[in-house]
Image (spheres, helix red, strand yellow):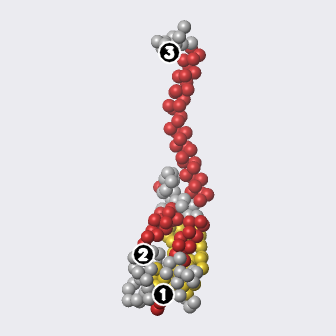
Amino acid sequence: MTDLGRTSRDRLPTQVSIAENMTNLLRRWAVPALLVVVAVAQICRVRGYDLTPWKGGGFGMFSSVDTLDARFVSFHVETSTDVVPVEPPSHMAKDILRVRAMPSQDGLNRIARRLAGHIWLKSDGQSKTPAIVPLERGQGDPLPDEVAPVKSVRVELWRQTFNAEKVRIEAKHLLTSKVAVSNEAQ
């Protein structure tokens, strides 16, 4: 006898109950189990890799002040006489945002190496920009006296935290990368 045309009433009781139990079990627990897996993975990434709780699933985001806006990257170039704060080139914004959201030493090193490969120019000193600025794409070749003698680039990642004891917001250092500037870049 074939199974064609048979309904669940025609099957043996054990076959029906096993199939129905499995279906009910899946319906009842699949979505909650998936949510638990996503939540645990996101919590592990927040704790183990400094992922901001507002990214990667967002579990715990309302219980933390550690938002993407509470993380910042500082950039400095070292000359023979001074350490000067600088702004990065605008085309690096996406990479900087990525390292703010999920910090890694490799990511910060990559940004520092890219900055070290730039040509740095002396600013005119008239604007509010730093005294040394990177040569942006499409600006053309600078004159030799416009090039700043940069020796190294330092990139630091910081996170703002709330110090409940002192009742104030403080900056906590997370990572630093320092890369020497090659003579070919200048």
What's the distance in space between the residues labelled 1 and 3, CA to CA? 82 Å
Image mark count: 3
Disc number lying in front (1 or 3): 1
Q: Earlier in the sequence, mark 1 or mark 3?
A: 3
Instruction: Tell me the quarter of the picture where residue 25 sits.
Output: top right
What's the distance in space between the residues labelled 1 and 2, CA to CA? 15 Å
Above or below 107: residue 36 = above
Q: Quadrant of the N terminus?
A: top right
Residue at image coords 38%, 89%: 126
Q: Nearer the viewer, residue 148 or 125?
A: 148
* Residue indicated by mark 1: 147
* Residue indicated by mark 2: 137
Q: Position of residue 171 (x, y in %)?
A: 54, 72
What's the distance in space between the residues labelled 3 and 2, CA to CA? 70 Å
Q: Position of residue 104 (x, y in %)?
A: 58, 64
Dots 1 and 2: beta carbons under 8 Å?
A: no
Above or below 115: residue 2 = above
* Residue indicated by mark 3: 8
Q: Earlier in the sequence, mark 3 or mark 2?
A: 3
Residue 173, visible in the rendered structure: no
Q: Which residue type carries mark 2?
A: Arg
Q: Earlier in the sequence, mark 1 or mark 2?
A: 2
Q: Which residue type carries mark 1?
A: Val
Q: Secondary structure at mark 3?
A: loop
